[in-house]
Image (cartoon, helix red, strand yellow):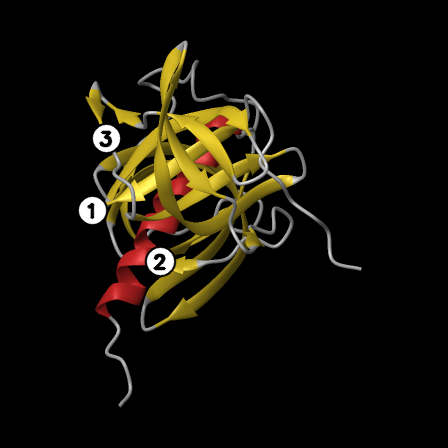
Amino acid sequence: MAETIKFLLNHRVEIMMDDTTYLSNIQDVEEEYAGISIPVRDGTYLPLKKGEKVEGIYYAKRGLYKFNTVVVGRKIDRIMMILLAHPKKFIKFQRRNYVRVPVSANTCCALVDKKSSLKNITDNQFEFFNAVSLDISAGGMRISTDKDVNVGDVIVATLPIKDEVINVKGKIIRVERVENRNICGINFIDMDKKTVEKIISLLFRIMRDQRKNTPREG
């Protein structure tokens, strides 16, 4: 039996528009629509109009869900709201089996002590080394580097994704030698929920761009 997902009051929503993510939340739920606060990013509001198509992410209790819908109007009830038709379907992000998205970016890394956190590493505890990311998910990534590393090593990395910079900590779980480079599989560790959600949102933008840039058959 398929699970039923519905918009609920006060739950977070992210709206995707022109390669930008705008934040909002559910303010009102009626039979024909859900009212969201006007989406905003860095002080810039997205005043959606009736008839505009909307693509977004819904933060449900059971996880994150992608959806597509349309704006059916506007409303003022203490605050200004954008009214969205209830989506015909929600597509779940699998938290246990995160989708991996190809991301090639120069990445700055360092090997650290397993007990170190991103907040207490001093400058005499590590040396930087360069790597190139191959793909990334909210649970881990693969990198290519000429640095000698081993399974079980812990690294921290500064990873540029789209127009954001993400700082992560991970454990190397696999190393494969390919053309004098080490291809490393890394599982993220000590990740806070906010960082996980940011990565998922950024990867969603990348997948969206990939779909737009993929030639249609026929």
Q: Is residue 28 left or right of residue 52?
A: right
Q: Which quadrant would residue 71 be assigned to in this image?
A: top left
Q: CA distance from mark 2 to mark 3?
A: 24 Å
Viewer-nearest of discs 2 and 3: 3
Measured along the vertical axis of the image, is residue 90 above or below residue 21?
A: below
Q: CA distance from mark 1 to mark 3?
A: 13 Å
- Residue found at x 58% / y 36%: 7
| Residue carrying label 2 | 207
Q: Which mark is residue 47?
A: 3
The x, y position of residue 48, in whole percent, is: 26, 36
Mark 2 touches mark 3? (CB < 8 Å): no
- Residue type at the position of mark 1: Asp
Dot placed on the residue nearer the N-terminal end, 1 or 3: 1
| Residue most extreme to the right | 1
Viewer-nearest of discs 1 and 3: 3
- Residue type at the position of mark 3: Pro
Depth check, front residue: 213 or 70: 70
Q: Which quadrant would residue 115 be assigned to in this image?
A: top right
Q: Which mark is residue 18?
A: 1
Q: Would residue 145 be visible to someone looking at this image?
A: no
Q: Which mark is residue 215?
A: none
Element class at badge 2: helix
Q: Quadrant of the C terminus?
A: bottom left
Dot placed on the residue nearer the N-terminal end, 2 or 1: 1
- Residue found at x 25% / y 38%: 49
